[in-house]
Amino acid sequence: MKRRDFIIKSSVATVALTSSAVALGNYLDFNHANDTLNIGVIGTGDRGTGMISNINKIKNFNVIGCADILPFRLENGLKSAQGKAKGYSDYRKLLDNKDIDAVLVSVPFHLHSQVAIDALDAGKHVFCEKTMAKGYPGIQHLVDKVNQSKTMFQTGHQYHSSRLYTHVVDLIKDGKLGKVAAIECQWNRHGNWRRPVPSPELEKQINWRMYREYSGGLVAELCSHQIDFANWVLDEKPIQVMGAGGIDYWKDGRETFDNIHLIYSYPSGVKAKFTCLTSNAKDGYQIKVMGDKGTIILDYSHAWFYPEGIENKDKELGIVDGVSGATVTWKKGFGIPINVEHTEPSEQTLIDFKDSILLNKKPISDVVTGANTAICIQMGLDAVYTNKIISSPDFY
């Protein structure tokens, strides 16, 4: 196993989208010259407004519409759009705007499916935030609509766009870890997860994540990223899940659990564990993939390789990076860093969305991967809420 397989310094080249690409006709129906994409953002809460800031960084990508039912949320979105967008209290009016080519759906979880379907019916390209849809009917209806549509659909699992994560997945699929034995993931925080409410009647609209009718709680909002990664790296769908959780710390009237613990079983025999806490933040976000040749540990933007068996050696390893020529000393107990230059995933996923539309290129995080993860989320919710082992649905 050569070190150069793991230490790779590479510039991430962005595809140059010029009028020549349009001249090739390698794109979907597109109404604007000079490769400019106009997008509307439906749902301008914290995530939607944050994504507007990312869109602002991307050349020829313009937010020209924002929609939200809460006036102060809409005002924040319009401010983030730097005066270039029109505001709508009804998202359907935004969809009527013929100058909008695409929409970003960033509404509460229970609305994802309907809003995305309405956008597809309006002929818009759709970026739908994770988790793609709530409940099996919502998932199926959205999949059916996407399959009937001629426009592009991308699910907002942004780590699918991370060049670091893509590189790690390629390493694992190339056998650099050997046979994968297990995956362990956590996303631990210390906080009540609440948003401030200016008026009591807005409680469920602002803190919708706390209520089962609107939310999938920690499973849908946090675990979904890492479950999506496990499906991706294993190239499998889990056959069953067991889990537990509870409202054991934040006894404040919430309905969704403040801690969850899930174990998914895959056809290959791999067990993937997922934990989310809100009362302890030790090690925060982490993914650990363990194989018989080594282990890779990932956080948001870094990765390390731990070769199997070398941990027991006392000496330091000074190894020359075959690409950069730099000498890296690896001490006992520390992993070998996997260095890949990459753009922040939430920005990169929007770049990829734009590229997919202009080049008629299927998104790496499409309706299929989004639906598979959404089904896993529903399985996990059923497991923790019923305290039963849940098998995958027949249509999965």
Image: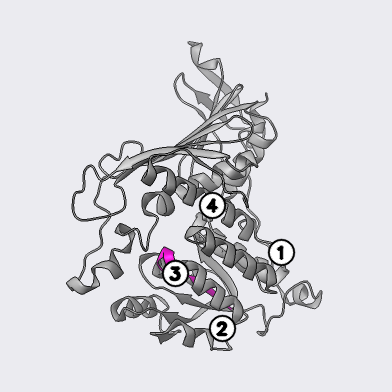
Label 4 close to label 2 by CB (< 8 Å): no
Q: Position of residue 255 (x, y in %)?
A: 28, 54
Kind of element beneath mark 4: helix
Q: Position of residue 295 (x, y in %)?
A: 54, 27
Q: Which residue is mark 4?
A: 375
Looking at the rendered structure, the kind of residue marked 3 is: Leu
Camera-nearest label, 4 or 1? 4
Q: Residue at x 21, y 48 (%)?
A: 250
Kind of element beneath mark 1: loop
Looking at marks 1 and 2 on the same chain, the residue that comes earlier in the sequence is marked by 2
Task: From the viewer's side, name the closer residue of 382 and 5.
Answer: 382
Quadrant (top left, top right, bottom left, bottom right) of the N terminus: top right
Q: Which residue is mark 2?
A: 100
Label 3 close to label 4 by CB (< 8 Å): no
Q: Residue at x 44, y 21 (%)?
A: 333
Q: Residue at x 62, y 31 (%)?
A: 321
Distance from disc 1 to disc 2, alpha carbons, whole Å, reads: 20 Å
